[in-house]
Image (cartoon, rainbow, N blue to C red):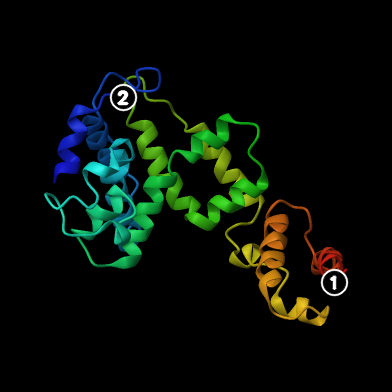
Amino acid sequence: FPELNALKNITHNPHWYPPIDAWTHTLKTLDEAAKMRIDSEFDDLCIMFAALCLEFTKLNPSEFINNKKWTSIHLDKCPSVTNCFMRRLTTETKLIEVVDSLVEQHKNTEKMFSSESFSNGDVRRLSLKVDIPLLLRIAQAAFYARFTEKDRPSKFPAGDWLLDRYHGLKLYVKSNLQPILQGRHLIELGLKPGPFFGKILNDAYQKQLDDEFMTLEDAINWAKQEVEKISS
């Protein structure tokens, strides 16, 4: 597996990590991830594979994707190094997708925590991309893998913060992420299906995610204004 071998030549930024290479950090992350297994076969597989692939984001994709020396998988079917690597191990699509999303999104935990500009909408959008409790497990494993046992902190502040936001927004209730405004509501307002349909629905959903409206009544009032603009 050339992807794993390449990690030995990558050194972490000493500002954030101890002076170790990416392969050593991968091994330590695997050790930490193993402690977080919860006897859920699929989730545990996702966590362990994500830990194995976590440092692939530091690799140059052009060296490993669509490279006939390493793989016969073509670029259009292989959007990332992680995806390409996993496709050589399994044909289980859901496993590949979840691992790929965990690897791609794991840094957002600390990025959101360290930035005051991240909103409820950003947390909701993250939840649409990845299972946040699962993400927190791999982010926590990568965080603790930076430290020696002597220096290991007792808490993962970024993880605690994001978990509080996750529960505060009740993102564990999947219906809370469903679009309030539906196509039938636009039809009831007199708009016929066409090119404006998708744009209005998407704009409405983005506003919903950003707390600009929380009820169907508010969404319909906003949509009325948009329909009037189109009609005028």
Please tell me in which quadrant of the rendered image residue 194 appears.
bottom right
**Horizontal and vertical percent for residue 114?**
56, 29
* Left or right of 105 on screen, residue 177: right
Tell me the number on the disc at residue 7.
none
For the view shown, which residue lies furthest in the left direction?
Answer: 69
Tell me the number on the disc at residue 231.
1
> Disc 1 residue type?
Ser
Q: Which residue lies at the image location 25% right of the left edge and 36% below the top edge?
A: 26
Q: Which residue lies at the image location 19% right of the left edge and 59% below the top edge?
A: 89
Q: Which residue is mark 2?
A: 12
Depth check: 64 or 15 in front?
64
Against 155, residue 179 (above or below) is below
* Left or right of 171 on screen, residue 73: left
Against 22, residue 80 (above or below) is below
Please tell me in which quadrant of the rendered image residue 165 appears.
top right
Q: Is residue 162 visible?
A: yes
Q: Which residue lies at the image location 43% right of the left edge and 52% below the top edge?
A: 134
Q: Where does the C terminus fall, quadrant-wise?
A: bottom right
